[in-house]
Image (spheres, rainbow, N blue to C red):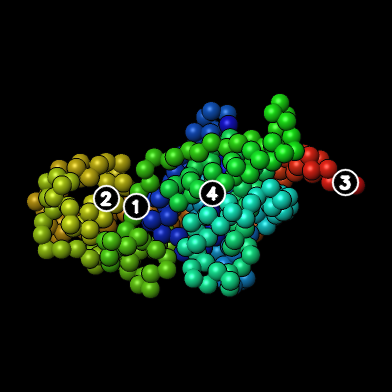
Amino acid sequence: MRIVSGIQPTGNLHLGNYLGAIRNWVKMQDDMAAQGGQSLYFLADLHAISMPFEPETLSSNTREMVAALVACGIDPDRSILFNQAQVPQHAELQWLLNGTARMGWLNRMTQWKDKAGKNREGASVALFTYPVLQAADVLLYQATHVPVGEDQKQHLELARDIAQKFNNDFASEENPVFTLPEPIIPPEAARIMSLRDGTAKMSKSDPSDMARINLTDDADTIMKKVKKAKTDPEPLPSEKAGLVGRAEAANLVGIYAVMTGSTVDGVLADFGGEGFGKFKPALGELLVEKLAPINARFVELRQDRGALDAILHKGAEKARALAVPTLDATYKALGLVRG
């Protein structure tokens, strides 16, 4: 069993990133190690250039993301952690798969429509074809399973379609070139909302830094943000149904539940009838306690560029070793002559 998953190096990671995705990666890493499987996690820096970007920011964000992943529990000795740019086989395989992918398939991708907006003629070719790179990302390593959320199901289906068509056209049923990866639907990811607007997701792009808990925030900053988080004047209800229509209250209670491994009803059993004057300090202290070790490790790591580059280099070497046989088989299947 082999799991492959990637994340774009956007920088400025926050509580929503940690609870929504990274924590699941750590669990999958541990599960794979226990089962004798393998987990590959990569920084999707090649994907990042499909949209406008600043080169210096991209490189610094890539290293910062490595620091964050390691601080959150990704172990470079138990998982293969690398960035795409150091494994050129990703881009090579994408080009080879472009001959199998179909314009109609890519035109139907909802994220292409969303990201390109009304100015499709002005969008980059990379934005249109990046689902083929996503397919290459997982097919290159003969991934058996890929963790996907709702927004990525369509992309994994495309990867399977490309793999199936390639196998049908250029290989045999007995000796296929590509493994068709199966989806892993992670446990329901925590949907963490803005501290200023309970109806909007916590986001690094929010102009107000008070809207999110960053992994770089110190204890005083976390307490300040939680205490100033938007709420309503009503006390907390004794059961979940009482949070309907109270988005900000539901968000804070939900964060507390996820951080303690409890349920919303479990939290309300303890705090029902209490006002936010008591609940917010308790939530702030909880977040400080849980995030302090991550924050300390993150701040330490992000300052050690040499260590971060060494992690990426080591991971890329392992990834390339796994990638070469698949790429060689693809060239051979296509009848391409190589020296």
Q: Amino acid at mark 3?
A: Val
Q: Are marks 2 and 1 in contact (CB under 8 Å)?
A: yes
Residue 256 horizontal/vertical position (percent): 27, 50
Label 1, secondary structure: give it: loop
In this view, the residue in front, 293 or 147, is: 147
> Which mark identifies residue 155?
4
Q: Specify which label sits upstream in the sequence, 2 or 1.
A: 1
* Front position among marks 1 and 4: 4
Could you tell me which residue is drawn at 40 percent across and 50 percent down?
Answer: 20
Disc 3 target residue: 337
Label 2, secondary structure: give it: helix
Q: Amino acid at mark 1?
A: Arg
Around disc 4, counting alpha carbons within 10 Å, would you say few (fewer than 14), some (14 to 19), or many (20 or more)? many
Disc 1 target residue: 191
Label 4, secondary structure: give it: helix
Q: Are marks 3 and 4 in contact (CB under 8 Å)?
A: no
Residue 68 horizontal/vertical position (percent): 50, 55
Q: Quadrant of residue 324?
A: top right
Q: Specify which label sits upstream in the sequence, 1 or 4.
A: 4
Q: Specify which label sits upstream in the sequence, 2 or 4.
A: 4
Disc 2 target residue: 254
Extreme top residue here?
Answer: 174
- The span from disc 1 to disc 4 (Cα, nearest Å) is 21 Å
Q: Amino acid at mark 2?
A: Gly
Q: Amino acid at mark 4?
A: His
Judged left or right of residue 336, residue 101 is: left
Around disc 3, counting alpha carbons within 10 Å, would you say few (fewer than 14), some (14 to 19), or many (20 or more)? few
Q: Specify which label sits upstream in the sequence, 1 or 3.
A: 1
> Which mark identifies residue 338?
none
